[in-house]
Amino acid sequence: VADHNSTDGTPEIAGRFGAEVHSEETGLGFATKLLISKADTRYILFVDGDITVTSAEFFAKAAALLDDPKTGAVVGCAVGHDFLYGIPLGLTMLPLDLARKIEMPDVIQGRETFYFEEILANSSLKIRYIRDAMVHRSTYRKYRYWPEWQGAQIRYTPSRHFSQLVRAIFVVYMMHLNSKSPRNFIYSPIYYVKIVSGFLNPKKWGDVDRRKIAGAIRE
């Protein structure tokens, strides 16, 4: 576990379960690379703190899929989701030797998946999906300005800005279709405009610390 000065008891809870806890004060990129460097297993598994794994067979199924040399990552999808896309790191497994090739800035706060997508694309590797593997509580999506924040993180990536923005259109609609909420689907164009707003003004929307976002949600 990499802990970035959390105030929700993460280090204490992880310690009680025997986890190795590393404290850092740099950023998400540094934390991600730190944990990859500490791993010594064949595969590395990313698990978000706001998900619950519901499939006891996920690890075995993912390992079997990764036996295919053309597969670079296996994503565990949320229960009931019909539209599968990208490489969200809520529940994702990939080979350790591939993960160690990933390069990203130390201080990034979001859009770390961009760097995973880059290494997979450059290596001509596929992403495979396992349905109904987890429940995602999506803590940060409750933040009022989450779309703007996400748009700013796209702007902070080093390349492919236009293609990322175009792809975000489809991602927004698939995300809201997965929610099975007509209200969310109707809201999709507004949600996307907010992403573009964040992209156009990254200094305003992108430099908010994730811990402050979590605090705003709790308040």
Image (spheres, rainbow, N blue to C red):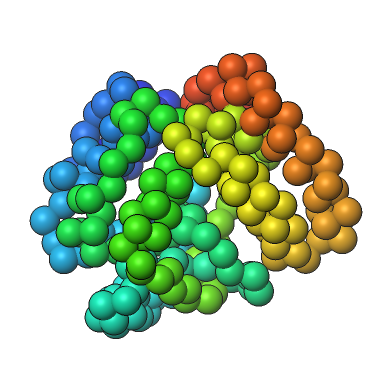
Closer-to-camera residue (199/204): 199
Residue at image coords 29%, 35%: 31
Placement of the N terminus among the 4 image quadrants? top left
Give the percent coordinates (x, y) of residue 116. 38, 52
> Quick check: 67 above or below 148?
below
> For the image shown, how many numbered marks are present on the structure?
0
Closer-to-camera residue (42/52): 42
Residue at the extreme top of the image, as rendered: 204
Residue at image coords 66%, 74%: 82
> Quick check: 123 above or below 99?
below
Residue at image coords 16%, 66%: 42
Task: Evaluate whether residue 19 shows in this view.
Answer: no
Closer-to-camera residue (189/46): 189
Horizontally, residue 132 falls left or right of residue 23, namely right
Horizontally, residue 83 falls left or right of residue 180, namely left
Horizontally, residue 195 falls left or right of residue 31, namely right
Task: Evaluate whether residue 187 shows in this view.
Answer: yes
Placement of the C terminus among the 4 image quadrants? top right
Give the percent coordinates (x, y) of residue 91. 42, 60
Residue at the extreme left of the image, as rendered: 40
> Quick check: 67 above or below 96?
below
Closer-to-camera residue (95/142): 95
Give the percent coordinates (x, y) of residue 209. 50, 22
Residue at image coords 25%, 54%: 99
Q: Quadrant of residue 127?
A: bottom left
